[in-house]
Each structure stands twice: as structure tokens, then as C-alpha cells.
Amino acid sequence: MRTETSTAVRHFRTALLVLLVLSSAVFANVKKIKKAKASDNPGQYISFSEPLSEAARERHALDRLTFGPRPGDFAAIHKMGLKKWLDLQLHPEKIAENPELAEHLEPLETLRLGIHDTYTHYPSPQMIRAVALGRGQLPEDPDLRAVVVRLAERYQARQQAKAGAPTPPASISVGIGSQTLLTQNAPVAVAKESAAKDANDDSDLEPKVKLSDILSAQQMDTLKNGKPEQKTALLESIPAAERMDFVYALHQPQRQQLMNLAPVTLRRQLMLAVNPQNVVAADLSEGKLQRAIYSERQLQELLVDFWFNHFNVYLNKGQERYSLPTYEREAIRPYVFGKFCDMLLATAKSPAMLFYLDNWQSVGVGSAENANPRKKNKRGLNENYGREIMELHTLGVDGGYTQQDVINMARCLTGWTIANEKKGGGFEYNDKMHDKGQKVVLGHVIAAGGGMNDGLEVLKIVAHHPSTAHFISLRLAQRFVADNPPPALVDRMAKTFLESDGDLRKVMETMVTSGEFWSKGAYQAKVKTPFEMVVSAVRATNAQVTSAFLLANTLQQLGEPLYRKLEPTGYSSANTEWVSSASLLARMNFALALANNRVPGIKINQDSWQAMVQDDPMRLAHFLLEQDPSAATRNAIEKALGDTELQKQLMANAKAGPPRLPSLIAGLTLGSPEFQKR
């Protein structure tokens, strides 16, 4: 099956390349790359006026405008031509998407659901408690209903044991495949025994499907004593009709142990049986990694990552995770090549942003709600969102605003809140919460007596402000050019921003057609973030990814857990944020584990590697880097090849198994300093 899929994908890429070459004359709209003048910038930026060779430009494009090249990408861009390739990446709608990506995204249901459905289908502990107490609604989907009932039963058993009550809880019954779960008349002694165990252990629930009813004796032994790859193969072989019964036949610790090895569909069912809300977070990370690895629209995916960090929202605040799939899908992704003002408004009206920065509960001091004499607990103005709009989202910290501007921005946005659950939990404007007084923001007077339009007007003011044009251009240049980009380039990007009404595609085009972008000053001047490093390593090895769950865990260890940046700044792209001896060692350990096929869910076909290293060990390093390794990397590889004790130490640190020549060379290459650059 994998061979057929790989063959189909190769045929797709070949057909795609032919199509793009044949139709490139129609698509070639991008401007000619301009030459940078040394006189355009201060003396310290002289290297940004020194042009790259044609070959270096192609490498720079793949390093900086994608998540890293795959085997064959250099040949493809060379055949197509850099100008045509750039135009396609700037117009992703012209690129046929990789069909393999659709297969990987299909099981991730939460990425397609609205906020309300995500919450009801993947309930929080609070919702499960409400169901157990008879105050919550069960999902309509029979499989999801079965999950919620099972979890509610477990909650009832624990609560009964804590109270030591002799009366059993009210019954909840529902069919699960061929099984029926019923808690009525469950013995108190059993419940007490359950409470003494792990809080998530549901071994007391009856009737229980036995593993021996699903698996053979040999399969049972494999599940207990087999190697990780054998366990993974076994899990993949379980028929879809039997998966739910298999999940419930396991005890909670068993489910947790198998989580890392299970294919995506079964892993989601394992999570559902333990803590359904974790499925939402796992789907988000899985989808982000799969898109970065497999998408043909690489620049678009880089920009989705950039803009999510720009308008950052923290997954673990309250019930925030339920709104994040909708936030990224509807407020970020559609606008990365659109107008900045539209994206700003979409994020401002998103329940995710309103909740994260507390605007949903911000109430004008003189509002109708606070004027009600019968209301005891009156709420006040919350400046959090107003401040971050100005400091982080638009003008920048040096954008020329005052504290009074922050206050008045917050006043304009009072009443921008979140509808209750019965209305779907989306954006809602509540006029009773709004401050109706006159406001002055950045010298603009917003007349008294307004409503929701106060917020719309002030967002337009900051979206079109010159300070915003400069700040957004600077942030983009810092991400794609250099940590300290040439000021003349930033000024030209800001000029494009203002002249095009904040057209982000045109701002990006100004950047990628500049001489400064294609200069020695920009070449390999950036260090990959952990997210970029992990994805680029998978792409460089052309690995097949059946599950990215362990990659997401790796990113947590490397310091960039996806969707979990607490501060509104989002993750930085600055080199200093990611360069330290500890982080580089952790990257090396990941690279060695990956190269040795020790990352569950990731499989590298190493057949060609053995042939490469027989004649010259450096051939494999050249293959992965698409260039000769540096002297330092060559020396590190040669030293390791000549020292068996060092080999054992490296493999032990990475938990990568016994040393094997091709995998050792590949791991050291992927962990090398030059591979960390982009």
C-alpha cells in the first residue's frame, strides 16, 4: 500500500512539473529581480548589495521560501526557472496540491468543525461532569455518544467512591458496537477500589471487551513484548470495525503507552477514551506538521506560521483549544496573501482572540450594563487587547501611540464579545457593554453615540497607519531576510504596503524581487526554528510520515511546542532565541534518532544510503545537504567513523540503537551547523 502511494505521489510530482513548465508563460507575472545598490543602505549593510550566483539563488529560494528542499527539488526549480517558481509560490492557487496531503488530513476532523461542534464532539472534563450529573447533552453521533457515556460512568464511579455512598449513581446506557454499558447497581466496593487506582483507570466498568476476544495469542504477545515497529504494524492491522472495542479493552496505562505507536485514526480513538479534548490539540499539531512536510504550496504554509505567531493565541488558556482550529482556518489562512486590514478584522472578531486577550469581558465604564442599578458585580474596561493591537499587531512598540490611545482603543472595542453556547459561541456585538462616549485615537475623533462601528473605524485607522506599514514590513523582513534587515528594503516594502492598501502579496513580492533578498548578506543568515529544523530534516530524507505525533512531542522538547506560546508575542524567528549548546545537542539527538528510524510514525527508506557510503561516506552527506559538507562537518563525520566508542556514545544519547554506518552519517549531517541554517 505504501509503495503504491509513493509511486502515485512520484507520478503526481512529475505531472505537476510538466504542467507548470508548459503553463509557466501564463503564470510568469512576478517582477524581475532588482539589483541592490551599496549606496542604498548604511555601510554595515554592504553585504546586502553583493549578489548571489544563480545556483546559490536556487538554494536560497528553497532554504528561505520553503520548509527545506526534498530530493529532486533543486532539479525541479532549475528546470522551471527561478522567476516562474517564485510566481507560483506567490500564487498558490495555481499550484495543484499534493494528493498525499489530503490523505493525511482526512482523519483530522476537528480541523473542519466549527467551535460549537468541536466542543460537543470532543468534550472537556466539565462537560463530561455535566453529563454524569444529568445536566449535559449527549452528542448525536453514536460513537461520540458512546465515548462521553463511558467517561461519565468513570466520573460517577470515582465520585461515588470518594463519598463512600451506598447508593449507586443514576444509570447511563448506550450501545457501543456489540456492547452495552450500564452503570446502574454497580457495587460500591468496586467503585472504591477504582478510586484507589489511577484516576483514569476504568478497569471497574462492566461489561468489558477482553483483548483475547479481539487479538490472537501471538498478537497479544507482540503487543506486550514486541519491538516498536512490530507493535505499530499490529495496531495498523486492527480492522476499523474492531478499533473501538480494542480501545475499551485496554486499561488507561496501556492506552497511554500505545499512543506514540498508533496510526492517526487509532491514536485519536485512544485519546477519546482518555481525554477527548486532547484530540483537538493533537489534530492541530498533526495538521500543521503534515502541511509543512507535504504541501506543494510551501510559501503559503510558511506565511500561515508567520501570521499565526504575529496574531498569537495560547491553546491552553481555558477552553481556547476549541476555537483554535476555526481561528487558524478562517482568520489567518485565507488572508496571508490578502489585505492586512481584512486579517486584522478577522482576528479581532475571532472568539479565540477575544477570549485570549480578555476583550470578551471588557465593559465600558458608562455602558448600559454598568448603569443598571440592580447589577451587583459590575465589570470594567480591559485594556489587554487594545494594547496588544497597537504594540504587537499593528503600530509596533515605537509606533507613536500613547497610553491614552490604548485606553480609547479598548473603549472602542467594548461590546465585541463571544455569543453564548446556545448561539454557537461565535463573535457577537453586545451594545449594552459598549462605551458610547467620544474617543480620540491617534488624533482621530470617534464621535459619541456610536456602536460596533467604533471598533471597525479604529481598526481601519491603525491598519492603514504608516507605522503599521513599517512595522509589518520589518517583521516580514526579519523572518525572511535577516534579523537586522537593510532599512532601505524595509522602507520599500512599507511604501508598497501603503500604496496597495496593505496588499500582503505585493509586499512579499517587493521583498522577494529585491536585490537585498538575493544577496550574500541574506544567504544562510537565519537559523531554523525547531519547527523548521524538524520539518526540513523529514523533507531532506524524503521520509514517509504516517503520524506526526512524536514530531510534535520533539518540538516540545526543543522549546517550540506548537500553539503553546503563552505570551502574545508568538515564537520569535531571531537567531539568538534558538542558538545554545543545549538546543544544538537536542537537535543532534533528534537527527540521529530520525536517521535510525527511531521516531515512531516516521519511516525513511535507507536502501540507497548503503550504496552511497560504500564508495565515499561523504556522498550521503552531499545528498542530504545538496552540496559538499563543510570542513567542520566532514571532520566530525570522519572522527565518528574512526571511533567506535564515540559512535556508541552518540547513539546512546539519542536512544537510536546500535551504530549503523549510513544512519550515523545521515544523523551527523542533519545535526550539523550548516543544516541548522536557512
Image (cartoon, rainbow, N blue to C red):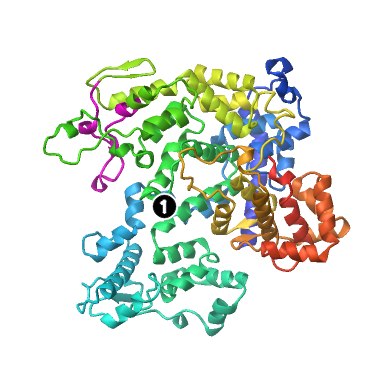
In the image, 299: left or right of 661? left
In the image, 563: left or right of 577? left
Residue at x 68%, y 55% (from the top left corner): 591
Residue 436 lies within the magenta run: yes
Where is residue 390, by image quadrant? Answer: top left
Residue at x 43%, y 48% (from the top left corner): 315
Tag 1: amino acid: Thr
The residue at which mark 1 appears reads as 110
Does residue 653 sit above or below 79 in this rendering? below
Does residue 129 sit above or below 58 in this rendering? below
Give the extent of the magenta segment: 409-437
In the image, 368: left or right of 308? left
Q: Residues within 10 Å of mark 1 (few under 14, many from 20)?
A: many
Q: Quadrant of the N terminus?
A: bottom right
Q: Quadrant of the C terminus?
A: top right
Residue 118 lies within the magenta run: no
Is 136 in front, or is 385? 385
